[in-house]
């Protein structure tokens, strides 16, 4: 969880049988071996005389082997249950936008698990790795809340998922940017949700960020939510544990200090300007595409402080530009976007 190269345990401190079990679980978790192969190895270990594996001896053949192995490995897991939300996405077969359920690991529940199990909680509150803007934002939030907050980071990026790199998976992850660069805490990425690029539309990003924003707001309050992200009541068949925890304390509070991604992520998800915009192309000023190749005293490349735009003005401009663009294609989507863009 903390590093791709380092194992989450010290092999020299574990008995041989327990070390073998950890290695088998890691191989299955990394998808290096199938569930049937994993069960075969467990059965062989039990037949070889390792008494620790005898309680887990099961038939390896069967259509439910994978399900049974996952259930057994997830027994007593402290990670939160998946949260399912309806998200607008593209159906490639119908070539139209439909609503489907997408699974989330909610940030405030991940924060609770990490805070509860951390051996050194002071690392979560560390802020030596924050830049000047993120530190200023965190201090302002702590002044408003009159308490110490855990700095959180939000990371969005795509990863190729097939052999010819024509298809990718869009990943939304949670990280802790406060610790210094060499710390394992800073390298940790906790998955929030993933979705294939093939199924993404402009509304998909808005619906995903609406859920993430709702969860981060409750992390800032330090409480478990009492209703779902859309204001509806929790479903007892899916969210029974969340009904019991509603209104209880998380024992910690946090503030979002960073939102990281590449150029495509900022443009498509956050609707920031791109090089193809007819108006402004810069994220920090009012520079246009024509002004890029003109070097004089009126261009931001020479005197950036002259026409530097405030952050709020840039966000307002980006939202207005996006609304005008989609309203040309479909006027009905304009009101929908204005309602879903409140996460900004």
Image: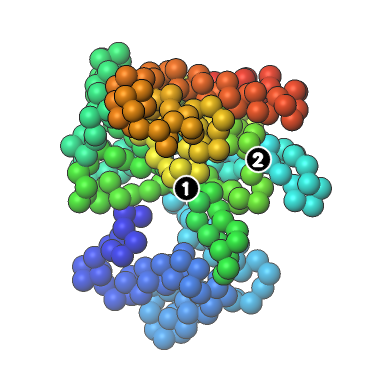
Q: Position of residue 84 (x, y in %)?
A: 61, 39
Q: Up-down: is 308 above or below 98?
A: above
Image point 65% across, 66% down: which residue?
A: 64
Which residue is located at x 78 percent, y 42 percent?
A: 96
Measured along the vertical axis of the image, is residue 162 above or below residue 317? Answer: below
Task: In this rendered view, identify the residue nearer to me: 256 or 70.
Answer: 256
Q: Secondary structure at mark 2?
A: loop
For image coordinates 47% across by 83% down, the residue present is: 44
Q: Residue at x 44, y 17 (%)?
A: 313
Q: Is residue 126 visible?
A: no
For the N terminus, the quadrant is bottom left
Residue ID for mark 1: 157
Q: Can you give x and y, in whole percent of width and height, for residue 123 in the image? A: 21, 40
For label 1, the crowd category at 10 Å Cα-Cα, with few meaning under 14, some 14 to 19 and many 20 or more, is some
**Residue 89 visible in rendering:** yes
In the image, taking residue 116 as reference, residue 190 lies left or right, namely: right
Residue nearest the observer in this picture, 69 or 123: 123
Farthest residue toward the bottom? 48
Which circle's residue, 2 or 1, is located before the other in the chain? 1
Image x and y of residue 150, in percent: 29, 31
Q: CA distance from mark 2 to mark 1?
A: 16 Å
Q: Residue furthest right?
A: 94
- For label 1, the SS is strand
Asked if residue 44 lies left or right of residue 220, the reply is right
In the figure, residue 164 lies in which quadrant? Answer: bottom right
Q: Position of residue 69 (x, y in %)?
A: 54, 65
Q: Is residue 169 left or right of residue 326?
A: left
Picture disc at residue 201: 2
Find residue 118 and report its image quarter: top left
């Amino acid at each position: 969880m903390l590093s791709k190269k380092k194992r989450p345990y010290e092999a020299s401190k574990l008995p041989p049988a327990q070390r073998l079990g950890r290695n088998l679980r890691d191989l299955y978790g990394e998808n290096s071996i199938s569930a049937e192969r994993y069960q075969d190895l467990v059965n062989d270990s039990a037949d070889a005389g390792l008494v620790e594996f005898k309680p887990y001896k099961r038939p390896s053949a069967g259509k439910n082997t994978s399900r049974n192995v996952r259930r057994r490995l997830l027994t007593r897991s402290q990670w939160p249950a998946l949260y399912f939300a309806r998200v607008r996405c593209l159906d490639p077969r119908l070539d139209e936008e439909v609503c489907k359920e997408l699974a989330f690991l909610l940030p405030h529940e991940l924060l609770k698990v990490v805070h509860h199990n951390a051996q050194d909680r002071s690392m979560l509150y560390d802020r030596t790795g924050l830049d000047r803007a993120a530190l200023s934002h965190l201090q302002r939030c702590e002044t408003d809340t009159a308490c110490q907050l855990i700095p959180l980071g939000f990371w969005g990026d795509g990863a190729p998922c097939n052999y010819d790199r024509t298809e990718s998976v869009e990943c939304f992850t949670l990280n802790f940017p406060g610790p210094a660069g060499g710390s394992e805490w800073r390298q940790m990425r906790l998955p929030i949700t993933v979705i294939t690029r093939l199924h993404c539309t402009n509304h998909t990003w808005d619906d995903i960020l609406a859920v993430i924003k709702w969860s981060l707001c409750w992390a800032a309050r330090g409480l478990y939510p009492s209703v779902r992200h859309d204001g509806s009541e929790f479903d007892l068949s899916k969210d029974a544990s969340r009904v019991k925890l509603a209104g209880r304390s998380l024992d910690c509070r946090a503030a979002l200090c960073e939102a990281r991604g590449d150029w495509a992520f900022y443009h498509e998800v956050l609707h920031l300007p791109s090089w193809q915009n007819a108006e402004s192309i810069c994220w920090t000023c009012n520079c246009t595409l024509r002004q890029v190749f003109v070097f004089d005293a009126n261009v931001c490349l020479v005197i950036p402080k002259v026409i530097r735009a405030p952050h709020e003005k840039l966000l307002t401009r980006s939202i207005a530009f996006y609304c005008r663009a989609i309203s040309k294609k479909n006027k009905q989507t304009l009101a929908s976007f204005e309602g879903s863009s409140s996460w900004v």
